[in-house]
Amino acid sequence: MSASTEETLARLGDRRPVHVHSTAALVTDTDKAAAAIDRQRARKQGEQEDGARKPGVEPLRGNDRQDLAISPWELLGVFARASTLARQGRGRGLAEHWQGLKYCQALATGTNGYLSLTEEGQSPELSYRAMQARELGRAFGLAVAERAVRSHFPDHLVSTLDAEVVLLAAFARSGPRPSLGARPRPDFFIEAWRPGEPSRVFAVTVNGNHQVANKRTGKADRSAFKQLARGSERAEQFHLAEWNNTPCLLMSTELLASEGVTVNALQAPGGGLIPTRPTAGRASADAVLSERNPTYVGGVRVPAVEGRRERYRDGFLIPRKDVGWYGQLLARTGAAGQLAFAGAGTEIAQYLTDKQGHKHYKQKTFAGSSSVRDARHKIGPTWFVGTDQVFRLNRTRVEAFSGIAEELYDLLVDGEVEAYRRRAYDLRGALPTGTTTPQWGPASFGDDGTVMTLRILPREDSTSSE
């Protein structure tokens, strides 16, 4: 066994603090960056009106502003759970399911005790630099966003969904491969839910950057401030029931901040309420979704505010009459993501519309290129079923496993989303937790019954291949 590999896996399960920066000064600096963006657009494109941004942006409150204690593997687990339905063609098992594995050696404890990029993480191949900023930025940003939602709704479970996959169901453009085009939009939706009660939805934008800012870096040139300003624009493109009714969380992660990785975070208030759903019948999450086609062009009515006249803007508006349908959509898309995380195959398709990729998941993928639900492991008292992947870390063979509690998996395969949600809620607090697990190594447990973990394969299994 390679000692360096052992050290890497131990490091992945070691919780360390991550800086969270959320102050009134950050709001001011973001506003200055937004004004600079508007001036630049006016010069280049002749746009006279300022960009539409989320009103009422403010710092996080209370404990949400404290530093986040988390392990690198928990971070990568957050990213993996949110990325399982990204649709990367027939190689989706390898291209999507294990995106986080490439960052196993990218994070460690810095000299000040905070989580930082390692030497390897600081010097990615040039062509992968933007990808690393985007993906690790999402991991850190979503971890802070999920914590904020849980702190406001501690007796709820939290589901994070790719916003594009959700919006495709209603707003996809026609074509051989439905898409949203270049229309700006949030990156994710976070739903806080509890069976038998209304749930809450947050629009989330997440970005990352490698800028090394110093005292000479102007506010208008600070990548984090510009990313928050543009994130506010993307969040403003989605509205539930009516304009400005959806709370949002805006995140920008500075990977090379001098004090260690730093997440700059802002929020905007809103209702975001989805009514209680019946547990059976056409309006339940067990029922196949009916077709909806809300208007995008001129679809958002902005009332007269701040001295401006009433006007209509393009945007993703879920009409009030369709809010219940949107709740069904979130639950069913979340179920598809859970199955994908566990390596399910064609079973995923039952929860997705044609526009979301029903046919994509209905067809069988090429042999060897897809994740398959063919692994079963007992962790603590719970049996988990899922999929695995063997890869080399410093020439040592390492196995990654992701899955979901077996009884929850069986309910989802059978199309019982409402029963799954009830059982998942009942099991909260009874499932394994922690950052490591016996006989494995670093672990990332979700309160929704999912797990992602690593272990070094025994030497006798690896000698035949080396």
Image (cartoon, grey):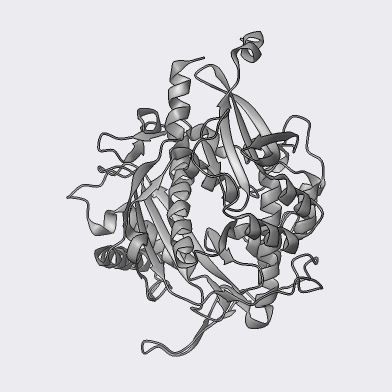
Q: Is residue 169 left or right of residue 307?
A: right
Q: Residue at x 60, y 25 (%)?
A: 391
Q: Residue at x 78, y 38 (%)?
A: 365
Q: Residue at x 30, y 35 (%)?
A: 110
Q: Quadrant of residue 124?
A: top left
Residue 14 x, y percent position in the rendering? 41, 36
Judging depth in this view, the residue of 422 and 65 nearest the camera is 422
Tell me if I can see residue 293 in this picture.
yes
Judging depth in this view, the residue of 195 and 465 nearest the camera is 195
Residue 463 x, y percent position in the rendering? 62, 9
Residue 432 x, y percent position in the rendering? 57, 44
Q: Which quarter of the image is occupied by the C terminus?
A: top right
Q: Is residue 367 left or right of residue 23?
A: right
Q: Residue at x 67, y 52 (%)?
A: 337
Q: Quadrant of residue 7?
A: top left
Judging depth in this view, the residue of 12 and 314 nearest the camera is 12
User: In the displayed structure, would residue 455 be above or below residue 295?
Assistant: above
